[in-house]
Amino acid sequence: VRGHRREVEKEREHRQDAYPCAHDMRERGKRRLWRRGSARCGWLMVLGLVGLVMIGFIPLALGAAASDLEAQVREVASQLRCPVCQGLSVADSPSELANEMRTLVREQLQQGKTSAEVLDYFAQRYGEWILLAPPKRGFNLVIWVLPFVLLPIGAAAVYLGARRWVRSPPAGESPPPRLDSPYAERLQRELDSYQ
Amino acid sequence: MMLKKVLILIAVLPVLALLAYALTLDPRAIPSPLVGRQAGDFSLSLFDGGQFTLVDQRGKVVVMNVWSSWCIPACYNEAPALEAAWQRYRGREVVVVGVNYQDRDAAAREFLARFRHTFPNGPDVGSKIAIEYGVRGVPETFFIDRDGRLVHRHVGEISFPILVQHIEQLLQGTGGT
C-alpha cells in the first residue's frame, strides 16, 4: 500500500510539472476560488489564445502575400509582348510560352528582383521589342512626344476647316446651275408638252 | 492650290519613304541583342539518355537548332540539311545540337527516327533555353564560335548551303553575320 501511495504521489508530481495549467485548473475546480496560484495558468491560456489567433491568421497572411505576388506578376507580364502571339501581352496570352514566361517572372520576383530588373532580363534576350511600351529615351522619345505635337496641329486644322465650312454660303442660296442651251431647250419643250 | 499640293506631298513622302525602306529589310534578320555576346550556358537531357552542356563544347563550333515536330513544313524541310551538315563536319570540331521546343515526347522521337538524326537532341523543359536565347518561333538556328560567343542567329528554315557558309566562316575564325 505504501509503495502504491508513493507511485501515486510521483505520478501527481509528474503531472504537475508536465501539465501545470491542468493541475491549476483541477485545484481551482476543487476550491472553486480564483487564487494567486492560478495566475500562471491564466497567462498560459492567454498565450495559447494569442497563439491560436496567430495560427488562424497565417493562411490569411500567406494568401495576402500570394495575391500581392500574383498582382505583381500580372503587372510585369502585362508590360511584356508575347513573342509567339499577335498583339497580346504575356499576361493575356494563353500560349504555353507565355505561361513559361509568367513562371519565370514569378521566380525572379520571389528571388527579390524588382519589376524593372525582370523587364530588363527579357529585354536583354529579346531586345526592346519585347517591351509593349518602348522606353522613354533616344529615338523612342519621338513616339512619346509626337502625339502631343500633332494634337494641337490637328485641332487647329479641324477648327480652320470648320470655320471655312460655316462661313461659305449654303447650297440652297447659290444660283441654279446653267444648262447648255440645247439641253435647256429640250427640257423646256418636254415640260411644255406635259402641261 | 499650289500650297495644297505641296502639303499633300509633304504628308505622303515620309510614308512612302518608310515603306521603301521596309522593302529593303530582310524579314529573317530579326535583330537580337544576344548576337556578339557570350552565349547563355545550358544543359540538355538528351533523348538517347546522355547529357549535353554548352560550356563543355568550348573549342568547338556549335550549331544549335531549335525545332518542333509540329513545325510544318519548315522543320521538316531543314531536317535533312542539319543531319548532312553534322555528317560533314562532325570530325572537324563542329557540334550540331537540336533543342526540341514545346513538343510531345513521342512525336519528337518519331521526328528524329524519321530523319535518322544522329546528332545530340533533347527537349527544352519549361522553354528555359528558348527564353534564354530569345526564341520567337521555330525553327531558329544559332551559331556559336569556339569561344562560346553567339555569332549568328538564323530565323526560319535553314538550307545546307547557308549552314556550310556559316560553319566555314566560324572554322576559319572570320565569324558569320
Image (spheres, grey):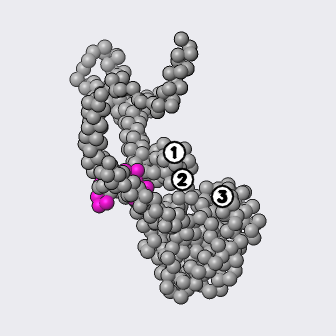
Tell me the SS state at disc 2: loop
Residue corresponding to mark 1: A93
- Compare marks 2 and 1 and give the one earlier in the sequence: 2
Mark 2–mark 3 CB contact (< 8 Å): no
Residue corresponding to mark 2: A84
- The chain letter for the residue carrying disc 2 is A
Residue corresponding to mark 3: B71
- The chain letter for the residue carrying disc 3 is B
Would residue B70 be counted in the magenta stretch? no
Residue appearing at x 27%, y 51% in the figure: A145
- Measured along the vertical axis of the image, is residue A121 above or below residue A88? below
Q: Which residues are magenta?
A: A128-139
- Measured along the vertical axis of the image, is residue B88 above or below residue B82? below
Label annotation for residue A176: none
For badge 3, the amino acid type reads Cys
- Measured along the vertical axis of the image, is residue B154 above or below residue A25? below
For badge 1, the amino acid type reads Ser
Q: Are marks 2 and 1 on the same chain?
A: yes
Tell me the SS state at disc 3: loop
- The chain letter for the residue carrying disc 1 is A
Mark 2–mark 1 CB contact (< 8 Å): yes
Query: How far across and how far down the image is residue A40, in percent?
Result: 27, 29
